Image (cartoon, helix red, strand yellow):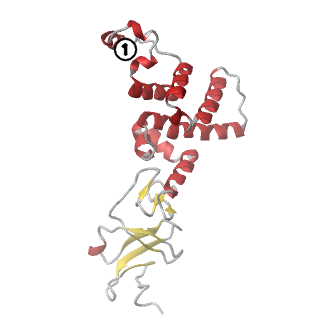
Amino acid sequence: MSLELALASFLIKRDGIRIILENEEKFSDADIHERWLDNRLRTKRFEENKKYFKEKHRYLYEIFEGIVDNFQATRNKIVHFHFNFADADLYDLKFEVTYVLIHVVSKLIFEDDTDLLSNMSSLLSDEVFLRLVKFPPYVYNVEKLASENSRRVLGCPICHQRTFSDSELKCFACGYDDPFADLITCRECDVRAVIYDHLNIDINKSVPALCLNCGERCVAFNCAECELLSTGSDYMDCEFCKSP
């Protein structure tokens, strides 16, 4: 249903509402509006809209031609109770459904898939979106997106998925971001991945810190001797001025 509505939405935006109507030549704009308000507006079948879409917007149709056809065939079998799912079929279907949602439906509605997070959060309720963030097929796709915008993809301190960009300092799954945050090197794994309470570090002897790469919990502090930012465990031993 979402796929069919998204396609109708795309065609209306690009080519006008008459493209998807049956007997559109019979109605004035006022008639169309009145019938829409009264739920009497008859539209063409999905196959007719898809055929027109294929002919007039071939450049976009080619991007997801195969996945739409396969998904539609599976959907038809489900609706008519003709499909006996094996476990592997169900697993594959989860990935197909998620792909259709985040790439096809989202692309048709927003005509842009660069801001996947914003698109998904606006399409879904808060409750469903939070469930999606923990859904492995969704995380799988988001991890690939995060890797394209990161030097290294790290674990998110909020949703705990490995979808946090060390370059943009935001999570591509749940949306957590802090443009003023800073990362420092972890003593445990030697990766620049430790996030800390940067708002309060100047007024505290030390603040809690967490490595988003290996998960090590530590503290961050400004060394009183060398004035460099460092990390430690439950005690403060500067890795710079007190190293051997």
**Residue at x-position 45% and y-position 18%:** 20
In the image, what residue type sits under mark 1?
Answer: Trp
Residue that carries the numbered disc 1 in the rendered image:
36
Q: Percent x, y for residue 159?
A: 47, 53
Query: How far across and down, in percent of the image, does residue 4 sit?
Result: 51, 25
Count the marks: how many? 1
Q: What residue is drawn where x is 49% and y is 78%?
A: 187
Whether residue 20 can be seen here: yes
**Which residue is at 50% across, 40% downward?**
102
Name the residue furthest left: 203
- Report x, y in % for residue 214: 53, 68
Which quadrant of the structure image shows residue 70?
top right
**Percent position (x, y) of residue 41?**
41, 12
Q: Residue at x 45, y 68 (%)?
A: 210
Considering depth in this image, is 224 or 123 the residue closer to the camera? 123
Whether 180 is drawn above or below 41: the answer is below
